[in-house]
Amino acid sequence: MAVQKLRRNEMSEVICELSRHLDFRIDLPGNVFKTYDFDFLFFERPLFDFSESFIKLITENFRVFDKKMYVKFSGEELLEDSCLIFDKNDLNSTVETVEKYFSDFMGGKVGYPIILFNAAFDWISFESSREEIGVIAVKKSVKKNEFMSGLESDFISIYSLLEMRSGSGVESLTARSFLRSYALAS
């Protein structure tokens, strides 16, 4: 198995679990996460346009947590074919398939927000059409530091956002917005 589509009843169960961690009524740059047991990384979106970063996220997930991954398009909506699950087999085919789904949003059938996460919700990535930056929340655990250090070179840390906020352009405004929502939450 590389990539499978979740059936509606399976998707409903996954969204129910996901809603324990995410508040679907909030959009970025607000804090979309319900609890404060996460640390955060950020990324330039759309993540699927940055294959190296996407591959790094997948690779680190399977290296550190060894859990299946999900990608859910259209937030909590139970749209047919809007939730994919994949494992560590045939990584190249997986990346191609997910990027193909994203390239035209399956013919316009699905959209934002796009949420990636693993089966144990050790981490959750949220990307919105409203912002140029997406966020990855990593649950505070024994494996958190290992996972985050594996992603450091491809993703934006809270400390990098602190540096970005001092400018005067759009980038600094974006950094300040995200820092208001996420700096105190981590």
Image (cartoon, grey):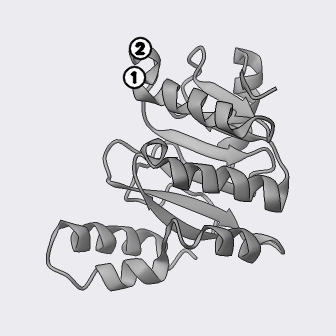
> Which residue is denoted by mark 1 in the rendering?
104
CB-based contact (under 8 Å), mark 1 and mark 2:
yes
Element type where label 1 sits in the image: loop
Instruction: Give the residue at x 31% y 79%.
Output: 164
Position of residue 180 relative to residue 138, above or below, is below
- Label count reads 2
The answer to whether residue 27 is left or right of residue 122 is left
Instruction: Give the residue at x 39% y 77%.
Output: 161
Residue 131's label in the rendered image is none
Question: Can residue 57 be seen?
Answer: yes
Position of residue 118 relative to residue 164, above or below, is above
Name the residue type under label 2: Gly
> Can you give x and y, in whole percent of width and height, for residue 12 in the image?
70, 25
Instruction: Give the residue at x 45% y 60%.
Output: 43
Of residue 70 and residue 28, the one placed in the foreground of this image is 70
> Which residue is denoted by mark 2 in the rendering?
107
Position of residue 142 relative to residue 67, above or below, is below
Quadrant of the snapshot with the N terminus: top right
Element type where label 2 sits in the image: helix
